[in-house]
Image (cartoon, rainbow, N blue to C red):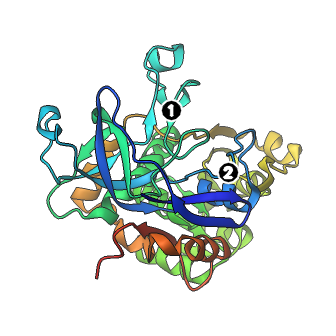
Amino acid sequence: MRAVFLEGPHRVRIGALDEPVPGDGELLLEVAAVGICGSDLHYYLEGAIGDQVPAEGFVPGHEFAARVIDARARQFGFEPGELVAVDPAVPCGSCPRCREGHVNLCPHVRFMGAPPFAGAMRERICAPAGNLHRLPAGFDAVAGLMLEPLGVAVHAVALARPRRGESCMLLGCGPIGLLLLQVARSEGVAPLVAVDPIAERREMARTLGADATAATVAEACEHVPEGGADLVLEATDAAEAFELAAEAARPGGRIVLVGIPQGNRYHLEAALARRKGLSVKFSRRMGHVYPRAIALARSGAVELERLVTHRFPLEAAADAFALQAARAEGIVKAALFPDGPPP
């Protein structure tokens, strides 16, 4: 079968991959659509995320929807051909973090699309039946793949514990940022100010519910009381993101860092954050939040499909990676379709 392989920084090829064989409790799936995530871009641009270094010929992709094509589908409560969203994380379930309920911090997790576990940029894949989530009527493959990044946003906003009526600043209006915006908006924060240097992304943030937008933190601070926000949600890939978040927060404010910085390092002037007495949390993936994500999307509180601005056949993966990495042509998120993009 066909698959996308990362061969190193800026090197993408289409090649053949052996057919997957389901293990115990797994079902065979046909990938319907798979998104290019910011973490995929780090592997593409830098060849690693911290100490996670994919081997040459790594198959990425963890945001995906698929059809159940396994002959045993009904034994697991699914219909043959049914479209499902797939949670890519398979935590061990028995370590201290899992027992505490922090499955997103499991040190033994098998995460599809994170080294050394191959991902979904291919025609077919196997996944545990418990990781499959039935999609409501009206949800297509694009909505299905977007439930994974929405889950990341749901988890991060839960960590933030937003309070109705408190000011919130969002740094970065890429896919995760725009989902954070919508989830935070549903919690009643106000005003909500979105910051991004790209005009098209600021405009999308405005149409998705931002009360104001700005190209810089300095400009954004003019739109919040005290010249800084009660809550700052960071979703960029910038090494200076931590410092920008500290600048954006009011004294005594809260920060949740969601993005992955380029080069695996933050730059921060310590006095800025220390003198403000800021509370800082780092967000890591998500827990078991797919039901909550599905409910938000189903209610209309969150729009998903608008964020997938560019759609490519699997064979055009190299073009899709290059375009998304360059943030060109108004792209927010690219998705790959093994059977070709829908009309």
* Number of numbered discs on residues: 2
Q: Is residue 58 above or below residue 328?
A: above
**Residue 260 numbered mark, or none:** 2
On the question of residue 210 being in view, the answer is no
Quarter of the rendering occupied by the N terminus: bottom left
Task: Report crowding for label 1: few under 14, some 14 to 19, many 20 or more residues within 10 A (C-alpha).
Answer: some
Residue 319 screen position, x and y as percent: 58, 77
Location of residue 311 with respect to 289 vertically, above or below: below
Amino acid type assigned to the residue bearing label 2 in the image: Ile
Q: Earlier in the sequence, mark 2 or mark 1?
A: 1
Q: Residue 332: where, in percent of width, then height?
A: 52, 73
Instruction: State the residue at coordinates (75%, 38%).
Output: 51
Q: Residue at x 61, y 41 (%)?
A: 115
Mark 2 to mark 1: distance in Å? 20 Å
Q: In what element is the residue under mark 1?
A: strand
2 or 1: mark nearer the eye: 1
Residue 301 vs 305, above or below: the answer is: above
Mark on residue 110?
A: 1
